[in-house]
Image (cartoon, helix red, strand yellow):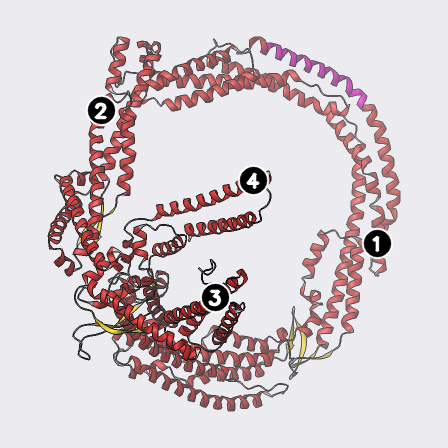
Amino acid sequence: PRFAGSAMWAKARLLRIQRQRAKLDAQRLPPTREAEDARNACSQLESALEEYIRRCYGDWIQTVESGLAKYLENSLMVRAQAMLESHLDTTLMKRDRDREGGALEQNFDKVLIRLFNEVAYWEKLRYEIPYVAMEITTHKERFRVMRENVMLVVRDYNAILQVLSREERRLFQERIHFLDKKITPGLGKLKWASRGIGEYIRECRKHCGDVRDLVFNFKAAKEQIARACRTVCATMLVHVKKKQVYDDVEFQNQQRAHADSVRRALDATHAEVKSTMLRAFEVFRHDGVEVQAEWMRFVDKVDKQLEEALRTTVKKSLQELSRAINGDSRTDVQPLFRINAVLDGNRVEFMPTIASLKDTVEAVSREAISIVAVVPRLSETLRVHAEGAGSRDAAHKDFFEVVSSDDDIIKIVHQIISGMTGIQAKMHKVLATWDRYKHIWDVDKDAFMRRYAKANRSLTAFETDIQRYKELQNEIQSEEGITNQGFIRIDSSPLKQKLTEHCHKWQVKFTDLLNNNANSELSALYSHMNKVSATFKKRPNNLDQLADQLNMLKQEQAEVEKNEMRFEPLQAQYKLLEKFEVAVKEDEIAKLTALGAERATHKQTLSDAERRLEKAKGDFRDNLLQNLNDFTAATQALRADFQRQGPFSHEIPVAKATEQIKEFQAQAQALRERERAMKQGLEIFSIEPPANKETAQTERDLELLQTVWDMRKEWDTLWNEWKYGKFASIDVSAMETFAQAFSKRIYKAQKEARGWKALDQLKESVDQFKKTLPLILDLRNEALRDRHWAQLMEEIGKSFNPHSDDFTLEKVWSLGLDHYVDVIGQIALAAGKELAIEQAVQKIDRQFAELPLELTDYKGVYLKVKTVEDVYTALEDNAVSLSTMKASRYAAAFLADLDKWERALSQVSETIELLMNVQRQWMYLESIFGGSEDIRKQLPAESAMFEDVNNNYMHVMTTMQAAGTALRATHAPGIAETLQDMDAKLQKIQKSLDSYLEMKRQAFPRFYFLSNDDLLEILGQARDPTAVQPHVKKCFEAIKTLEMAPPGREGRKVYEATAMHSPDGETVPLSTPVACSGPVETWLLNVENAMINTLEKLLFHCYSEMRKTKKEKWIKEWAGQLALTSGQIEWTMGCSKALGDAEKGNKHALRAMKKKQVSLLGKYSDMVRGSLGKVDRKKVVAIITIEVHGRDTIDKMAKAGCQSVNDFEWL
């Protein structure tokens, strides 16, 4: 347990420290400073551990709550909702989902289990247990037995549900519904403190056993049907011998004979399944319509199983046929037919086709599928036996229709047919031989050559490709013409001939493309050289022509090496054509021969052109320098003019400033055009172009000026809108946001342009506006009321209407409100505070106008308060708020409302607290006076008083329910006074009840071991002595129940207690039966006396028999308590005798006693190792434990030298 476990841990550490300290103290070590420090540290640690234990105890005490009996109000069992949801899918179960159909769980509250564990350990620590906890813990053993018995019912019931599937539950629903009716009291009516639980459990277990037998028989029938289905699955519908070659007729005849034998076997299996189903149906023959319908669904399910078995055997059979035709990873197909491989168009095909073989295989496949038609559906053959099930309109398809349309079976059939018609898929190794040649015929030669030409392949690639096709041609001719593969013998000679022709065509295509490329390159070289020569023969007339010729010359000089590299590959192409014996045209050969002379002429032309162009450059240079000087002067003039006449002043109108900016921008654009016109000439003569910083700076300033004047226009527009717009419609937050953003834009512009008066004046206007924003914010405060505006008018001495349309921002300035900023700020602040108080009071009004007093049903007759947490939370929060608001200096206008709510909340709190106290007492006493006629008879005055309280309670709760909210309910007339009167009466009743119980406990003190609830349960059923049975183990230690003989037998007129039973299963008959009649405390006292007398007599006989009888027999015949006590008497007498002998001089008396004790232990040990019953084994183990302690005590006395019964060690 959480708290006691921690305390036990600390206690163990404390004891270990104390033992170690005691050992050290016994050594009598010389005193030292270190020893003293160690002792102090040890003492501190011991104190800390003791404090920790006390703290754990205190923490646990805080968790112990009063009224623990409420945890016994749980029902004995509950439904396991997770399992319930997974199985509820029928109409019946969905209707009863809260009561039936789910697994059960024990419902004993875990709070009590934790409490029992805590109390057990705190008792071991010898701490005082609170009366509340001790009162209910005394019943711990009774509740443990009850929990175990309830678990037996839970396990029996759940075992039935677990073994049944969801569909099977619907089939057994009437029997399960019957069990649910028997179990229902344990789900609601029977509580852990109720009577009659034992009889209820026995009856539940009996009925569960009957249903379980029926379920297991049904399961066995299902298994027999499943075995039949497995037999069907194992049947092969097609018989194929391995390594045997068939012709198509022989194969078909053998399969027909095999199909006939399979039909007979399937017919016998179907008859067996039908017989099993009829026997199973007898269980449900007389059940209701829903079960009969569910039985037919079960029959349909068995049909599904047979259908699946037939589908499986068809699939397996067809798969076997498919393997015989197509082979698998372990077997190869033997050759059966001869075909020719030919190239038909762009495909390799086999001729002739295998159509005849295909027809044979298709016929066998159809025969295998049609065999299932011999098995009819059970739903049709059994329907006449199911009375009351009705008939169904929708007829099921027969097995043949279903199996023949199965996708997987169709797929396998397709695989078989595909293996026959698509032989290339099954002869992959043969086809792979020709697949490597597929590109020879499959590729579009013309399209491929077009792509090949665009790729501009190298000469080496051409040579490789041409040579590759020559080698392929030789390789194809060397291939074998006749091959065997699978069940096909292939003649490939026609295919070889066709592929050889394709190889020759590819060689022609490549050589033609190579010849065309070489001719194109030769022509391109001649064309380029002619173009360059014609260009340089012309004289340049202007800078553009000069630049074009210079660029061409530069380009040609840069590409001299590149052009030279084109000649050698061209020669190599024509040599390759010669190698492959390709005929070239005569004009191409002539051009190729003259190509060397043309190269020399081209080089000379470039050299002459270079000299002519150098002379022309000097003539154009002087004009270019003069234009450059004029351009520089123009840029400087524009800059100076802009600085003198630019729109920098704030006095210029916005429109005129914009026009001036556009004029300067046009002049700057014209200078940029002149600069671009001179750029090409400057590049020709390698002259550095002017930086033109003046124009660039002017352009930047113009762009910035445009931004400044745009901002000025935007500001003027908005300012006029704010100034003359209705003041009540002004969006102050938008004004503030815009002003902040506008200031940032001005600041950014000022970083680039300092000293511009237009920009400075704009900044000044915006700053002035921002200073007035606080005033505008205060005047637009939503908290301002008419009283605040009146106060402001009184302060400034002027009158105005703040809600009229003519009250604008301009009006604010004309009234001079900007001179009363501080006064307006103070008024706005006070208005905001008052608004907060006003809203808080309104919130309280709304909250308590809706806050309900939650009531719930109690026992179907009464009402009770479900929870008041929300009410208490609202009371605490609002009480603090009201106190805070009343202390505020702004609360003067709301003091009346605040006082009203303070009084109202106080009344709500007091009334709710009184109501909960009355309800708690009433619920406790109602279960006593309302459930026990005997208690009412024994306390008549208190019963009458409680009846009056009960009537008042019902009236109060009805009134509060009608009120609806907590506020109206607690302020109903006379409610508080009625509750106070009820509280006083309930306290008086409780006091009388306690006095009555105390009187009973004094009459029979063992009643102090029982809680008030347990004692009241006994007294309330005083006429039924068996009601005491659940509480006997609390009154008498180690006694579970009393054996009570009922009246009417052997002349008994009342119940008589005849024996007592221990929790371990021992039974001790009472020497004299005790009549269980009259007051409970009286006959229980008689039972106690009978117990004492019986044990006294039996102990004498037990001790006498101990010396006469063998230990095994003696242990089995006598109760454990008697055997233990007799053993202790014998041990004490033996030790006393040994000590007397030692006193007389026998020094070995104790050793002899120890030897005798060891011998006795040996006998008991032998008994433990033998075959003993559960109870006898517990007896022997307990005796051995005591006797081992006795042996150790004798040994300790012998070592201490004891020689007299008066020695300290013995005493």
Q: State the CA–CA distance, disc 2 to disc 1.
A: 117 Å
Q: State the CA–CA distance, disc 2 to disc 4.
A: 70 Å
Nearer the camera: disc 2 or disc 3: 3
Quarter holding the C terminus is: bottom left
Q: Position of residue 1027 (x, y in %)?
A: 23, 66
Find residue 895 and name its label.
2
Check contact, mark 4 vs mark 1: CB within 8 A.
no
Q: Earlier in the sequence, mark 4 or mark 3?
A: 4
Find residue 1020 and name its label.
none
Q: Nearer the viewer, residue 1012 or 206?
A: 1012
Q: Position of residue 429 (x, y in %)?
A: 68, 73
Residue type at mark 1 is Tyr
Compared with 479, 969 (above or below) is above
Find residue 36 and name its label.
4
Query: SS for tag 1?
Result: helix
Nearer the camera: disc 1 or disc 3: 3
**Horizontal arrangement in the rendering, residue 576 relative to residue 919 (left or right):** right
Nearer the camera: disc 2 or disc 4: 4
Residue marked by disc 3: 1139
Residue type at mark 3 is Leu
Find residue 574 and name its label.
1
Compared with 715, 1051 (above or below) is below
Q: Earlier in the sequence, mark 2 or mark 3?
A: 2
What is the crowding at mark 3: few (fewer than 14 residues within 10 Å), some, or many (at least 20)? Answer: many
Image quarter for residue 533?
Answer: top right
Q: Residue at x 18, y 75 (%)?
A: 1047
Q: State the CA–CA distance, disc 2 to disc 3.
A: 95 Å
Residue type at mark 2 is Leu
